[in-house]
Amino acid sequence: MKAFNFLTKRAFYINLAIIIALVIIIIQLAFISLDKFTRHGEEIIVPDFIGMNCDEVLEKYSEDFNFILLDSVYTKNLEEGSVYQQDPLPDSKVKKGRNMYYIKVSVAPERVMMPNLRNLSLRQAMVLLKANGLNVSELEFVEHFAKNAVVEQYIDTTVVEPGSEIIKGTALRLQLGYGLNDRKTHLPKLLTINSKNVKNLIHEASLNMGNEIFMDNDDSEDYRVYKMEPAYNAETMVTLGSKVDVWYRSAKVFDFDTYGRELFKKDSIISVMKKKKMTEDTIKYVTDSFDYILTHRLFLFDSISREYDKNLVFEREFYEYIYRDDTLDMDSLFLIIDERNNSLYYEE
C-alpha cells in the first residue's frame, strides 16, 4: 500500500494539473501554428487572367500568387504577351500564395518546317500540309504529264524550298499537273455543307474557291451552303482549277434539313428516270421543275413562309407515277408536271 501513498499527497495533484495544462497548451499552439502555416480561412477567388497582359498580371497579383511560366504559344485570337491559359482555372477557390501556372502568347508567331510536296498527289499534299499546320490558298494547273501531282510549291509568287522555316498557318499556292488526257473534274456536292469545310472540299476536287456570298447577318459558324455556281450536277464536269462561287445562308434562319430532303428527293427521282431510260428532254423537263421549286421555296421556319411553301411541291401522285414499273406514258407524265407547274404560285 505504501507504493500508492503519493496519491494522498497534494504535490502529486499539483504536478498532474501542471502536466495536463502544458499538454493542452502545446496542442492549442500546434493547431494555431498549423492554421497559420496552411492559411486556413484565407481562401481567395482566382481571377480570369486569360487575355490580360502578363506583365500587368504579375505586377498586380504577385502577392496573391506565385506565378510559374510553363510555355508560350502563338495565336491570332489574343494580343502578344497576354495570358493564353492558366491553372488553377478562373473562379477557383485557393489559398493565398498558391502556385499559378500560365501559358503566354508569344511575341513571334510559331514557325514550322516546310515539307516537300513535290511529286505528291494533291490529296497527299493536303494531308501533309494539315499535319504541319499549313493551308492551301490556290491551285494552279500547268502542263505536266502527271495529273494532280504537285509540280512546285509557292508562298505568293516565291518558291518555298523543303526544310525552310515558315509561319504556322501560312497558306501556300500549289502548282499541279494537268496530265496527258482529260483536264476535267467533277464538281463537289457542297449544298448544305458547313462553311468552314467548303474551301477544303473545293481544293480536294482540284478546284478553287471563287466568290463567297453571305446572305444573312449571322455568326459565320452557323452558315451553310445554299447555292453554288456552277450548279451541282453529278454528271457536270469542269476544267481543273476552275473557280466555284458559293452562297451561304444561316442555319438559324434557313431550314437546311427540309432543303436537304428536297435535294435528295430530286436526285433520287432523276436517278430512277435515268434507269427507266427516259428521254433527255423529259429528264431535263423534270429537273427544271425541281429547280424551280427549290429556287422559289422559302425554307424559313415561320408559319407564314411554310404555308407558302406547301404550294411549291409536287403531288404524291407524281412520285408514285415515276416509280411505277410499267412503261411510262410520256404524255401523262408531262400533263402531271404541267398541271403542277401551272399551280405553282408565290406572292412577292
Image (cartoon, rainbow, N blue to C red):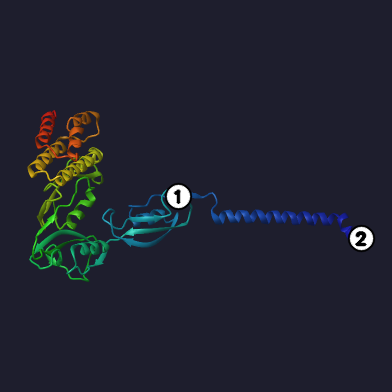
Q: Which is closer to the viewer, label 1 or label 2?
A: 1
Q: Would you identify the image quadrant in which residue 336 lies?
A: top left
State which quarter of the image contains the N terminus: bottom right
80 up-or-down from 325: above or below: below
Which label belongs to residue 92?
1
Name the spot of residue 291 as percent of width and height, x first: 13, 40
Q: Residue at x 8, y 44 (%)?
A: 280
Residue toward you, 41 or 122: 122
Q: Which residue is drawn at 67% across and 55% down?
A: 27
User: Relative to 78, does residue 346 appear above or below in the rendering?
Assistant: above
The extreme right residue here reads: 1
Point 77% across, 54% down: residue:
17
- Indicate the amino acid at tag 1: Ser
| In the image: residue 264, left or right of residue 342 | right
Sequence order check: which comes first, mark 1 or mark 2?
Answer: 2
- Which is more toward the observer, 324 or 198? 324
Name the residue nearer the viewer: 13 or 108: 108
Q: In this view, does 253 lie to the left or right of 138?
A: right
Q: Position of residue 256 (x, y in %)?
A: 23, 41
The span from disc 1 to disc 2 (Cα, nearest Å) is 66 Å
Task: Note whether residue 313 is visible.
Answer: no
Q: In which quarter of the image is the C terminus?
A: top left
Residue 124 place in picture, x, y as percent: 22, 64
Residue occupied by mark 2: 2
Given the current orientation, which residue lies at the most extreme front position?
326
Q: Can residue 102 be seen in this view?
A: yes
